[in-house]
Image: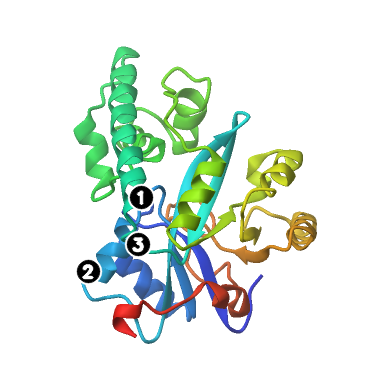
Amino acid sequence: MGSAMPSDMHVHTTFSDGRLTPEEIVTAAKAAGLTYLAITDHDTVDGIRHLYENGLYPLKTLRLIPGIEFSCEEDEHDVHILGYDFDIYNQELADKVNELSESRWTRFSQMMARLQELGYSITEADVMQIAGSSRSIGRAHVARALVKKGLMPTVHDAFEKLLEHGCPAYIPHFRLQPAEAVALIRQAGGIPVLAHPKLVGDDELVSSLLTLDFGGLEVYYPQHDASDTVRYKALAERHALRLTGGSDFHALPHREPKELGVFTIDDALAEPFFHPPEALE
């Protein structure tokens, strides 16, 4: 959904499973001419805090919206919930994020033990080399390490043969319930948005989830085709929700879009989610 004045409300950095640092994302966003940008790392606000604490946020030329993406589960479906424009130092949110981070480490250790039992010569250090500064270690990091060590041909194969639900090295993880994530974002002063509804894989479930206290629906998304977009736009309007969208950019070679600024939404959709940080107005 390109436009003359573009924005992107769904971007990942090295603080979760993206390949670019927050600084590199900001540089790429400026080069792409974006007006609004939301950094939405998985289960962490460390990337946006990093920019803030290093005096790189707010910026005059690029309007940054603090964001997060919570991984939730409902009826065995993956449900991702985006939060925008909240207090990045909210204590309740910080406590829950720490809990999620600790559970990720536990799961990571279990996954490594399982892979070693299965005969894959891979260590936590191999994965950490790829994860770098990320505190939200996930399957994507493990998959990339398996490829780098020549134990799997591609990331896709690593998931399909080992890491997907029901595969030999899959370890279930602690996840928030959607209602819990929505409440957490609301109490931190933010706006909860249901991410990429098509990827939930069940439109009836999507409709029932939207009875929660959501503020928006991610209608514009690279994997939504034209008919999906029309359908979800109608759904958002039916529930009186704001329309949002974003590229879900990770800077990974096997994932579209390859560059920031290729998939964008209209500024007018991002604008209601932006408020300059008070301390620096």
Answer above or below: position of 30 versus 183: below
Seen at 66% across and 66% down, the residue is 242
User: Which amino acid lies under the numbered mark 3 shown in the image of this protein?
Assistant: Ile
Mark sitting earlier along the chain (2/3): 2
Mark 2 and mark 1 residues within 8 Å of each other at the beta carbon: no
Report the number of numbered marks: 3
Seen at 46% across and 63% down, the residue is 189
Q: Quadrant of residue 24?
A: bottom left
* Nearer to the camera, 278 or 138: 278
Task: Give the left or right position of residue 123, taking residue 91 as reference.
Answer: left
Q: Position of residue 117 (x, y in %)?
A: 31, 13
Q: CA distance from mark 2 to mark 1?
A: 20 Å
- Provide the residue designation for mark 1: 92
User: Which amino acid lies under the numbered mark 1 shown in the image of this protein?
Assistant: Glu
Secondary structure beneath label 2: helix
Residue 53: assigned label: 2
- Provide the residue designation for mark 3: 88
Mark sitting earlier along the chain (2/1): 2
Task: Give the left or right position of residue 33, taking residue 134 as reference.
Answer: right
User: Which amino acid lies under the numbered mark 2 shown in the image of this protein?
Assistant: Glu
